[in-house]
Each structure stands twice: as C-alpha cells, then as structure tokens.
Amino acid sequence: MSENVIYKLSKQFALRIIKLFRYLQDEKKEFVISKQIYRSGTSIGANIAESFYAQSDADYINKLKISLKEASETKYWLELLYESETLSKQEFDFLTNDVNTIIGTTINIINKLLEK
C-alpha cells in the first residue's frame, strides 16, 4: 500500500533531517536555516501520519497536500544551504533525491484518490 510507503519514506527523511539539524548547529554553527529545515522536514511525516486518521477523504487529501507544501519548503532550504556552500553537493543531492521521492510518491497518491 502506497500510504505505508510514504509514511516510511517520510519518517526516514525526518530522521535524516534531525541529523542534518544537529550537524548544522554543531559543525557549521548555522542556527537560522537549521531550525527552518528542521520544522519543515519533520512536518512532512507528521502530516502524513495525521492523514491516516482524517475525518473524510477531503481531509485526507488536504493533509497530504500540506505534506507536499512542507516538502517543497524543505527543498527550498536545502537549495539555500547548498548555494551558500553550507552543504556539499553530495549531501545536497542525497537529501534532495529523498525529498523528490517523497514529493513524487505523495503526488501519485493524491492523483489516485482524485481519480475515484
């Protein structure tokens, strides 16, 4: 079931974001964007988890769309961290690939629900 896949992907991504947050704070002494990406990157999975107990199909889709917004914001923060030379190309590519997978999977779930 794709909903379980997106839950697992987003939870694994949130754990990577937590590690990134610690790295940015401890090693790079970056305290502003690190908090922003921490919030948006962990919120993706929180909204997906919340969607499982939605009150209606519309509420379920809305929670997934909120996850998409958070994923898009997270991607923006990753771009800023990379373009400011705070993250290496390898770090950026790894995390961006993960968030792109989450975005694509979430869009597919939403589209399938809307086709019903």
Image: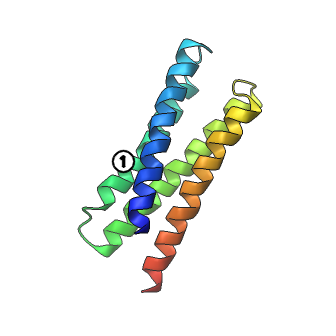
Q: Is residue 19 above or below residue 110?
A: above
- Which residue: 46% across, 43% down? 12
The color scheme shown is rainbow
Q: Nearer the viewer, residue 52 or 34?
A: 52
Q: Is residue 114 above or below residue 98?
A: below
Q: Is residue 13 above or below residue 36?
A: below
- Which residue: 51% across, 76% down? 111
> For mark 1, does the 10 Å Cα neighbourhood hold few (<14), some (14 to 19), or many (20 or more) residues?
some
Badge 1 marks a residue whose secondary structure is helix
What is the quadrant of the N terminus in the image?
Answer: bottom left
The residue carrying mark 1 is 46
Can residue 31 be seen here? The reply is no
11 horizontally vs 102: left or right: left
Q: Outermost residue, bottom direction?
A: 116
Can residue 55 be seen here? The reply is yes
**Residue 15, percent across and down?**
45, 36
108 horizontally vs 97: left or right: left
